[in-house]
Image (tube, rainbow, N blue to C red):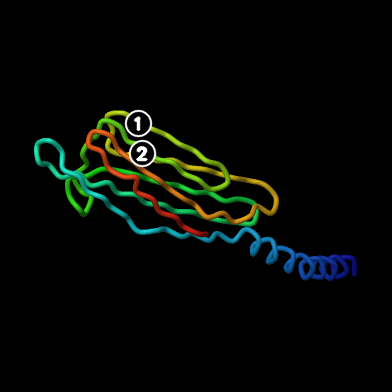
Amino acid sequence: MATRKNSCCSSKLLLLALPILLFAAMLTADETQTDITRTTVALTGDSTRVYLHVTAETSYGWFWQRSTGRAYTTSDVKGKQRVKVDKLCLTLMAHDTTTQCVEQADSIVVTEKKRGIAIPRRTVRLSAITEGPVLGPETMEIRP
């Protein structure tokens, strides 16, 4: 009889715990959105074309939001051949504003992670510029 009583109680406990677990899974569901690449073009002094590409992605859950922005320069529209520029800067604005600049680079990545209880969804805004050659500002935004 003792075994039967324990199995009865454990099945009732399981029935109570199942809705709680399903609700918790809904609160932390991952929503991801990625925007397409945007490009601007400039000619360098030696008639080489340089394209500035900007991409963004963001993921959201009830307890967090993670946003990533990327900027890179290439010599072709499809973005296969990278080209270094004198200075590449990227600004990411979501919960905070983060600006990073890199010299003699062909790409840059900026990530922002925000954690807490009931984090509000924020639109992610990016702005990228280059010097040597001068490109941009190339801006875009993405909503989670």
Check the image and report above or below for 101 versus 79. above
| Residue drawn at the location 70% of the way across and 50% of the way down | 117
Task: Find residue 102 and name its label.
Answer: 1
Where in the figure is residue 85, as x and y percent of width and height?
24, 34
Residue at horizontal 20%, vertical 49%?
80
Query: Dot 1, how many residues are within 10 Å of its Cα: few (below 14), some (14-19), or many (20+)?
Result: some
Residue 56 spot, x, y in % from top left: 41, 52
Question: Is 53 placed left or right of 81 in the picture?
Answer: right
Q: Is label 1 in a helix, a strand or a loop?
A: strand
Q: Residue at x 23, y 33 (%)?
A: 132
- Examine the rendered structure and indicate whether residue 143 appears above or below residue 114: below
Label 2 neighbourhood size at 10 Å, few (<14), some (14-19), many (20+)?
Answer: some
Element on which disc 2 rests: strand
Q: Name the kind of residue labelled 2 in the image.
A: Ile
Q: Which mark is residue 18?
A: none
**17 or 60, which lies in front?**
60
Judging depth in this view, the residue of 5 and 107 nearest the camera is 107
Quadrant position of residue 82: top left
Seen from the viewer's position, the closer of residues 73 and 20 is: 73
Cβ–Cβ under 8 Å for marks 2 and 1: yes
Q: CA distance from mark 2 to mark 1?
A: 7 Å
Q: Residue at 15% of width from left, 45% of height from top? A: 49
Q: Amino acid at mark 1?
A: Val
Q: Which mark is residue 108?
A: 2
Using residue 61 as the reference point, say whether residue 37 is left or right of it.
left
